[in-house]
Structures are given as C-alpha cells and as structure tokens.
Amino acid sequence: MAQRKVPMRKDIVTGEMKPKKELVRIVKNKENEVSIDPTGKKAGRGAYIFLDVAIAKKAQAERTFDKAFGIKIKPEFYDELVAYVDHQVARQELFGNGK
C-alpha cells in the first residue's frame, strides 16, 4: 500500500509546519466571533496553534490572534484557549495520540 500524505499546517505562533492532528484550529466567522474549532470544520477563516501550553501562553501574551484576524479579542478567549490546550495535552498523555 502507498503511504498516505499527512496534511500539514503552519503554527501561527512559531511559524513551524506541523501535522494537522497536532494542532488546534481557531476560527473567525462572518460576525467576527472567534472560537476554538475542535472539529476543524467550522465556517470562517482559520488559524492553527500547536497543542502546547507554553505556545498558547505565548499567543496570549503577544495577542497573536488579534493580529491574525485584525480584530480585538476578549482576554477570556485566550484563557479559554490555554485551558483547552492544557486539557488536550493531558488527554494525549493519558490516552495516547488516538482520540
């Protein structure tokens, strides 16, 4: 059997290309609402961040998604993002990479 191509996406914080499964998508819809997209299928403009708490905190400190989407995002979103990434990292440690 031929090897399947692994979809790669760019981490908006570090600028590194990573496999899509190791990233989480953040999406901005037409109403300028920004949310975490765990399925990767919500409508809107997306940006990806690596599942690492340190990188999520760096995005929070630099307000990375404000710059990427060109809008002011509430600080609560960044708190939610750090908590979500922390939860996903803990899940991966418990259950392995398969979700």
Image: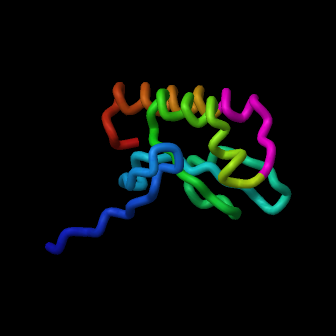
Q: Residue at x 34, y 31 (%)?
A: 95
Q: Residue at x 51, y 27 (%)?
A: 87
Percent coordinates x, y for residue 18 in the rendering = 37, 52
Which quadrant of the structure image shows residue 77?
top right
Of the 4 image quadrants, the one containing the C terminus is top left
Examine the residues drawn in magenta and state their main secondary structure. Answer: helix
Q: Residue at x 33, y 40 (%)?
A: 97
Q: Is residue 48 above or below residue 6?
A: above
Q: In the drawing, does residue 57 fall left or right of residue 6? A: right
The front one of 96 and 79 is: 79
Q: In the drawing, does residue 8 fall left or right of residue 45? A: left
Percent coordinates x, y for residue 34 in the rendering = 74, 48
The front one of 4 and 26 is: 26
Percent coordinates x, y for residue 94 in the rendering = 35, 25
Q: How did the renderer colour the structure?
A: rainbow
Q: Is residue 22 above or below residue 93?
A: below
Count of marks placed on residues: 0
Q: Is residue 27 above or below residue 74?
A: below
Task: Name, please, the residue furthest toward the bottom.
Answer: 2
On whether residue 77 falls in the magenta region, the answer is yes
Task: Name, please, the residue furthest toward the right.
Answer: 31
Q: Is residue 20 above or below residue 96?
A: below
The front one of 99 and 73 is: 73
Q: Which residues are magenta?
A: 71-80
Q: In the drawing, does residue 93 fall left or right of residue 39? A: left
Of the 4 image quadrants, the one containing the N terminus is bottom left
Q: Residue at x 67, y 62 (%)?
A: 45
Percent coordinates x, y for residue 66 in the rendering = 72, 45
On whether residue 61 falls in the magenta region, the answer is no
